[in-house]
Image (cartoon, rainbow, N blue to C red):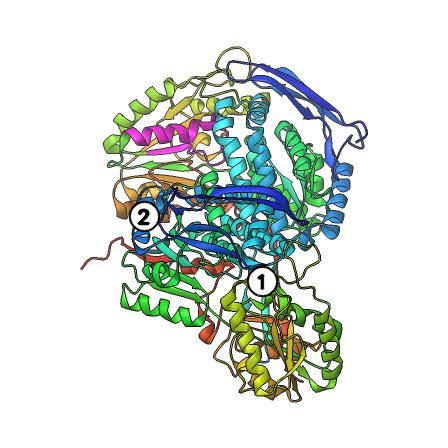
């Protein structure tokens, strides 16, 4: 391997000590290589604003090289040439390697993103290896149908891999969103060109070493960190990439869809933003609802597509709920991601910080009541206090638009019909939560909210077996569950004439 | 305390030492049978005793059922989420891989099949089967139906509970894997009876199951005889399902016991007399090779063996010449010699049975093209045998011989040969050799069998279902289909507002 460069970061923290070495180059055709134009980016630690390391970023030429490598690999030794059982074993092996390196990867993720080490280790990493194992189990179960027609012909479908799949993932859950795409795509026999966010490539780069160690043939997985408007756009526009799976903002999702339309009409699946309502009825278990609702908006610094950012509380319990919610939010510990009792780390970047602060300002300007927080936390890094607005009205920006930060908008409601209408008054439709003990109401509300996921009596509880994906402008297609396989297969119908004469 | 089987392998194919307890495996422990008796395990290459294993009785089955119910109600069933069952099964796969050579050696020693076949088919296939079903464990899904606005309905695919599994001696480890895989994936607990002729790999697996960390009582293995332990399982009032692979004769008894006891769900994988139809335009060399594999692989001790070979008249003479040559080249001998194709039959009973079929063929006037007698003077070896000049009414054409004895029959007419092929109480498998697309598919569809092979024979995969029509069985193993054998479907209706 000619001149593969790496960087070693020394961790010396309360929760993790150790040296973690990661590659700094692009991973194309089984090798770590410099980008054609030698682009680099200096990664910033959002907790301290200090440099972490300098790594390569690719642009259009590198995406093209990666796509060609992926196309060749698909033709020569992947696709249907690699039986499902073989794909299954490789995915299992990768899962084992992820588990063996959990602490190291969690440390990189916490360092790069600003999420706490505890959250990375307890959530991001286990989800990653579980998703790999779950789809390893599907790899030899991609089944078509044999369809009864007439005695003089037979018809059946084959669920074939699509070919080269482009994957573009964001910075809030860099590793787990990457794996949620890679795992089903690989299970179905596709090859991959992945573009992690330019801000948060570290876990993906580390993963490349494990992909190689697991024994995936060269070119099956290619990883090119880069900027959205260059590398990302190149994925959307590529004439060799057959499908793109994107997780990110609705704004960028539109660009991807447009690029696909203008190039080769590649298939797309999009997992976009949300403004998910949590609806808490009078008969809810208030203490539980408070805890879930807190987690719903403040988890991962509020940088969560499914965040329960609009909280509707029925009048009968409003005061009680608000008091408990505010008290709990007040106690959330904000600070160093590597401190054992931190709940919330910094926002990912200066730009995101400014954006969230801008929304907080607009909330105040629009007349909402700032019940808690609203300011920067500390003087170093991109920390924002957990923030609570009340007396919000439907047209306020903080109620309509996705803030992607630790800002909750709480509203009072009286009747079920009214709150369902308000909950649906949004262009988004990613998720929703309803809190009630009444069986009829639970089912009714869950059914009537226009969202891809409805949680009853909890929020943000992932389950690999159930699909995730948005209605309306929250996206198209599904991640997780059996449904995700549809995104990564092409259905071919085969008809065989065994007696029809003309 | 049950004894341990200790053995030093020093053979060309495998060298190594094994040592493990041969007790009954109940609730995670190895125990003596309640009558403290044992069963001798015989080496079929020489008729000598290899070791003895504990013998189970109906009382031991009761103990196992108690353990299995306790596990189902606490540590298994719906108490162990699919993902957890999947992880344990994957662990078992890894441990089997580590012990693959040893398992193959034990299988060859106990059953008489060659080490190479055992390693490359039986053990590899068993590992693949468990691996395949580990992937299903967290994917056993029901449906949601749309009825009316004021109702929610869905189905749950729940585990049945305690299931009984009775397996034969021809592919001891592989048959165990085919049973354990789907049953464990779906969350059931298990009472398994291996054949009294070939218990060694099943018992060894119990040690691996413990090593993998399955909770005690999830898998229980009781060595014993069909008319005691087998009967106790099929007639047990607290075993809710029985799965059996073996002869059609015994299959009837199992079904009868189930009917007379608690109407437990029954799946059966029984015998066959599978036809292999070779048309004029077949690739002749391939047809010869597959036909030989079809009847002589595993010493003919294969339920789906292509034992009736129908050859169209245009190629009959050439086929027979080449098939006889091919058969002559199959080496019979020591299972542990690297170039052996065929070892001994599994037991003296089987040897006698097959020899008597051969005698009946000769007595009825069929012609022996090759073989037709014992091989050597020690052990239960029989020469690969081809009969021609047969008549449909002959026993060797009608009945399942379960040995290396094939009948070759000339045919002229396509419609007639399909009728002949289907003229049997069996319906396990069938094969057709032709290059013609229409004929291949039409013939495959017309053959009344659970598996139709086109231009191949005895070709199985973990993800493709296998099972019989007619008296060859009930239900399907392998593939997603096997899950249906091990789930109980519950429909849940939630009334969300309809008032009476």
Residue annotated with mark 1: B379
> Which SS class for mark 2?
helix
Residue B46 on image: x %, y %: 57, 59
Residue annotated with mark 2: A443
Q: Answer whether residue A295 is magenta in the image.
A: yes
Between A8 and B35, the one nearer to me in the picture: B35
Task: Choose mark 1 or mark 2, whichever is in front.
Answer: 1
Q: State the mark number for residue A64.
A: none
> Which SS class for mark 1?
loop
Residue A216 on image: x %, y %: 68, 42
Q: How packed is label 1: few (under 14 Cα within 10 Å), some, or many (20 or more)?
A: many
Q: Quadrant of residue B285?
A: bottom right
Chain that bears disc 1: B
Chain that bears disc 2: A
Q: Is residue A124 above or below residue B35?
A: above
* Range shown magenta: A287-312
Between B130 and B41, the one nearer to me in the picture: B41
């Amino acid at each position: 391997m000619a001149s593969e460069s790496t960087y070693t970061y020394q961790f010396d923290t309360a929760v993790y000590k150790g040296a973690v070495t990661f590659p700094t180059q692009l991973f194309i055709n089984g090798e770590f290589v410099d980008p054609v134009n030698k682009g680099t980016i200096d990664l910033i630690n959002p907790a301290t604003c200090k440099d972490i390391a300098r790594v390569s970023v690719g642009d259009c030429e590198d995406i093209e090289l990666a796509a060609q490598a992926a196309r060749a690999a698909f033709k020569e030794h992947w696709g249907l040439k690699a039986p499902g059982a073989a794909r299954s074993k490789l995915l299992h092996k990768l899962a084992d390697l992820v588990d063996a390196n959990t602490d190291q990867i969690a440390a990189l993720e916490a360092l790069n993103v600003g999420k706490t080490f505890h959250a990375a280790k307890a959530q991001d990493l286990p989800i990653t290896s579980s998703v790999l194992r779950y789809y390893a189990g599907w790899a030899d179960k991609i089944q078509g149908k044999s369809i009864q027609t007439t005695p003089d012909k037979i018809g059946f479908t084959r669920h074939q891999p699509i070919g080269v799949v482009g994957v573009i993932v964001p910075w809030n859950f860099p590793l787990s969103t990457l794996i949620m795409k890679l795992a089903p795509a690989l299970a179905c026999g596709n090859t991959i060109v992945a573009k992690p966010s330019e801000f948060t490539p570290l876990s993906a780069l580390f993963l490349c070493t494990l992909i190689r160690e697991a024994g995936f043939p060269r070119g099956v997985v290619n990883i090119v960190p880069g900027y959205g408007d260059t590398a990302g756009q190149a994925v959307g526009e590529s004439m060799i990439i057959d499908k793109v799976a994107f997780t990110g903002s609705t704004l960028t999702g539109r660009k991807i869809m447009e690029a696909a339309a203008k190039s080769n009409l590649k298939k797309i699946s999009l997992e976009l933003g949300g403004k998910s309502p949590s609806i808490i009825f009078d008969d809810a278990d208030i203490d539980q609802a408070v805890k879930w609702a807190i987690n719903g908006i403040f988890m991962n610094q509020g940088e969560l597509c499914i965040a329960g950012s609009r909280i509707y509380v029925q009048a009968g319990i409003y005061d009680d709920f608000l008091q408990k919610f505010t008290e709990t939010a007040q106690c959330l510990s904000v600070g160093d991601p590597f401190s054992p009792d931190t709940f919330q780390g910094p926002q990912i970047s200066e730009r995101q910080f400014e954006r969230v602060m801008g929304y907080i300002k607009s909330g105040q300007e629009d007349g909402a009541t700032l019940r808690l927080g609203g300011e920067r936390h500390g003087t170093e890094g991109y920390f924002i206090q957990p923030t609570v607005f009340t007396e919000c009205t439907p047209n306020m920006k903080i109620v309509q638009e996705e803030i992607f930060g630790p800002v909750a908008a709480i509203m009072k409601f009286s009747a079920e019909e009214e709150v369902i209408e308000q909950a649906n008054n949004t262009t988004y439709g990613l998720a929703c939560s309803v809190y009630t003990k009444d069986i009829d109401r639970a089912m009714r509300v869950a059914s009537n909210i226009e969202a891809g996921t409805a949680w009853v009596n909890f929020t943000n509880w992932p389950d690999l077996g159930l699909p995730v994906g948005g209605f309306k402008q929250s996206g198209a297609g599904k991640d997780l569950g059996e449904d995700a396989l549809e995104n990564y297969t092409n259905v071919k119908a085969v008809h065989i004439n065994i007696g029809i004469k003309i | 305390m049950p004894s341990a089987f200790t053995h030093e392998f020093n053979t060309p194919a495998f060298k190594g030492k094994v040592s493990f307890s041969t007790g009954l495996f109940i609730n995670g422990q190895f125990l003596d049978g309640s009558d403290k008796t044992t069963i001798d395990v015989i080496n079929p290459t020489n008729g000598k005793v290899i070791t003895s294993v504990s013998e189970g009785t109906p009382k031991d089955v009761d103990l196992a059922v108690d353990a299995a119910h306790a596990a189902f109600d606490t540590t298994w069933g719906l108490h162990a989420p699919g993902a957890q069952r999947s992880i344990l099964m994957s662990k078992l796969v890894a441990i089997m891989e580590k012990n693959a050579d040893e398992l193959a050696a034990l299988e060859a020693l106990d059953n008489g099949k060659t080490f190479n076949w055992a390693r490359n088919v039986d053990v590899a296939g068993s590992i693949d089967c468990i691996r395949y079903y580990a992937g299903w464990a967290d994917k056993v899904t029901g449906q949601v139906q749309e009825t009316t606005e004021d109702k929610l309905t869905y189905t749950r695919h729940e585990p049945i509970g305690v299931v009984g599994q009775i397996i034969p001696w021809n592919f001891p480890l592989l048959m165990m894997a085919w049973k354990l895989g789907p049953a464990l994936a779906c969350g059931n607990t298990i009472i398994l009876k291996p054949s009294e002729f070939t218990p060694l790999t099943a018992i060894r697996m119990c040690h691996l199951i413990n090593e993998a960390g399955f909770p005690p009582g999830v898998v229980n293995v009781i060595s014993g005889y069909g008319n005691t332990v087998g009967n106790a399982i099929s007639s047990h009032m607290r075993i809710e399902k029985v799965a059996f692979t073996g002869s059609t004769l015994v299959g009837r008894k199992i079904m009868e016991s189930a009917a007379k006891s608690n109407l437990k769900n029954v799946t059966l994988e029984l015998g066959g007399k599978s036809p292999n139809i070779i048309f004029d335009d077949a690739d002749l060399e391939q047809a010869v090779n597959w036909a030989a594999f079809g009847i002589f692989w595993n010493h003919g001790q294969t339920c789906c063996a292509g034992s009736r070979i129908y050859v169209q008249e245009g190629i009959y003479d050439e086929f027979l010449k080449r098939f006889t040559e091919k058969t002559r080249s199959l080496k019979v001998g020591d299972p542990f010699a690297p170039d052996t194709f065929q070892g001994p039959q599994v037991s003296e009973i089987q040897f006698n049975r097959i020899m008597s079929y051969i005698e009946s063929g000769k007595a009825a006037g069929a012609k022996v093209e090759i073989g037709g007698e014992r091989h050597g003077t020690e052990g239960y070896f029989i020469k690969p045998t081809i009969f021609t000049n047969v008549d449909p009414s002959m026993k060797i054409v009608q009945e399942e011989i379960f040995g290396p004895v094939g009948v070759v029959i000339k045919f002229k007419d396509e419609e007639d040969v399909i009728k002949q092929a289907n003229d049997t109480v069996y319906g396990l498998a069938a094969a057709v050799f032709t290059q013609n697309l229409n004929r291949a598919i039409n013939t495959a569809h017309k053959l009344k069998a659970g598996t139709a092979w086109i231009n191949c024979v005895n070709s199985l995969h973990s993800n493709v279902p296998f099972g019989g029509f007619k008296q060859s069985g009930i239900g399907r193993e392998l593939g997603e289909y096997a899950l249906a054998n091990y789930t109980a479907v519950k429909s849940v209706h939630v009334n969300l507002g309809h008032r009476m």
